[in-house]
Amino acid sequence: MAREDAVRCLRCLLYALNLLFWLMSACVLGVAAWIRDSLNTVLTLTAHTRLEEAAILTYSPAVHPVIVAVCCFLIIVAMVGYCGTLRCDLLLLSWYFGSLLVIFCVELASAVWTYEEPSVQRSDMISLKSRMPNYGLQRYQWLTHTWNSFQTEFKCCGVIYFTDWLEMTEMEWPPDSCCSNQYPGCARHAHYHDLSDLHQEGCGPKIYTFIRGTKQLQVLRFLGVSIGVAQIIAMALTLTLLWALYYGRKSPEPDMPTLPPPDDPDPDTAAQAASADALKSGCSRSNKGCTNMAATTPKQQFEMERLHAAA
């Protein structure tokens, strides 16, 4: 009974861990996709600079294809673990344990291999100004779209201040993406009437903060550590469940002992019992005969029985 309760408890814990694997893997994939959009924008603006290298070093563990593939594979492994736990199948549970071990080793190796602190300084932000003169040109429409997207998303304008657009380009006012309330011609109106309608913070500090790590990146790191800890617990519980199921099947509980069937009686013994019954029946007829029969030996009784049978 105690073993059955332990197995039931282990199965419930594995059910909860597999559900946790599904949720955390889905969260990792969602946050990684969210970060990837912003990362592509930053990499476009910081191309061929030290900022690009720093951004890749910071975010490559989070959006690396290996990590994405591992999360997708973990969802499948959790399904197999759920089925193996439900059916108490030793083969599925063994495959589940081996897969978790491989995934854990891949995650650990990837984290160690890609971990490196980016060497970036605030003075490196000035290199972003080299990308500004190409804004608005026909052959650099992709760069124009990237600047507009970044300034709208991060609510910034220019590199250090919105006047960078006037210094680095031939524009008379900043792009409309610098406006807090965007509409066609809003930057021109703000430039001549109210500069407070423009974003007052530059995009350089925003990019620096992004490279140093955002809240989304912190969430991904927390999820990664949580998945690793959950995998260790799941592997320990799976090993314990395998041990309990294996030895439970190898040495089942003994049933109630059953008495062996009695052996067949010996023919001589059966004959003697029959003769005794006959003698008892004869005794009921005559007390005198019973007295004489009781005084005879077994051999004499046997001879007398033969005489009666012959008669």
Image: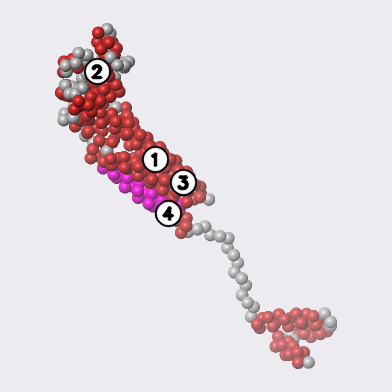
How many discs mark residues in the rendered view? 4
Residue 172: x and y in percent read 20, 13
Residue 92, numbered circle: none
- Among the two numbered marks 1 and 4 on one chain, the one whose residue lies closer to the N terminus: 1
Nearer to us in this view, 169 or 161: 169
Q: Which residues are magenta?
A: 88-109
- Among the two numbered marks 3 and 4 on one chain, the one whose residue lies closer to the N terminus: 3
As drawn, is 217 to the left or to the right of 79? Answer: left
- Among the two numbered marks 2 and 1 on one chain, the one whose residue lies closer to the N terminus: 1
Residue with the mark numbered 2:
175
Amino acid type for the residue under numbered disc 3: Arg
Amino acid type for the residue under numbered disc 1: Phe
Q: Nearer the viewer, mark 2 or mark 3?
A: 2
Residue with the mark numbered 3:
11
Residue 32 is one of the magenta-drawn residues: no
Residue with the mark numbered 1:
21
Which element type, helix, strand or loop, lies under badge 3? helix
Point 23% across, 40% down: residue = 113
User: Badge 4, how many Cα within 10 Å: few under 14, some, many 20+?
Assistant: some
Q: Main secondary structure of the magenta part?
A: helix
Quadrant (top left, top right, bottom left, bottom right) of the C terminus: bottom right
Nearer to us in this view, 15 or 79: 79
Classify residue 76 by image quadrant.
top left
Residue with the mark numbered 4:
90
Point 28% across, 24% down: residue = 149
As drawn, is 14 to the left or to the right of 220? Answer: right
- Is label 2 in contact with label 1 (beta carbons under 8 Å)? no
